[in-house]
Amino acid sequence: ATSSGSVSISSADAGISGVSGEITLATGSSTAGSSGSIKLLTGKGDGGSGGDVVVKVGLGDTGDGGQVSVEAGSTSSMYGLGGDVAVSAGGSLVNRGGGIIMSSGA
């Protein structure tokens, strides 16, 4: 095959005046070690572009728009450090790396 398959995970649409379903990706807890990780990765594009990762929140037509929240983990250890939030743009072979663009709603 020339193309790999796709995976789609979705919840059903809501009925009239209902709430659509929720999708939760979670790892288990650990009592004597580290908990697991969740990774969203796209593949390398040899002869093409790398894939995108898109996080988009839905429109609210009579209420507020949804929120996007990114929060690093805290620690209860007096010797540990809280987790970092890292945002970095991609580099290139010709010193023309991508930018980081942040904007507020209009």
Image (cartoon, helix red, strand yellow):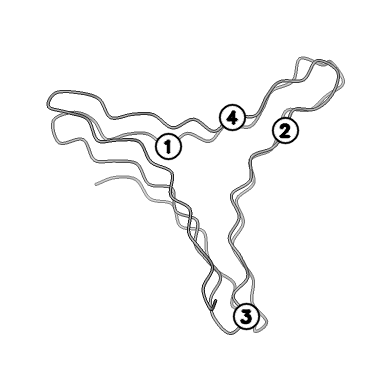
Three-letter amino acid code at the position of disc 4: Ala
Three-letter amino acid code at the position of disc 2: Gly
Labelled pair 4, 2 in contact (Cβ < 8 Å): no
Residue at image x 38%, y 41%?
Answer: 10
Q: Nearer the viewer, residue 75 or 51?
A: 51
Q: Nearer the viewer, residue 62 or 101?
A: 62
Q: How far apart are the alpha carbons under marks 3 and 1?
A: 32 Å
* Image-quadrant location for residue 64: top left
Residue 68 has which mark?
Answer: 1
Labelled pair 3, 1 in contact (Cβ < 8 Å): no
For mark 4, what is the residue? 26
Residue at image x 49%, y 30%?
Answer: 24
Q: Earlier in the sequence, mark 3 or mark 4?
A: 4
Residue 36 has which mark?
Answer: 2
Labelled pair 2, 3 in contact (Cβ < 8 Å): no
Q: Nearer the viewer, residue 44 or 87?
A: 44
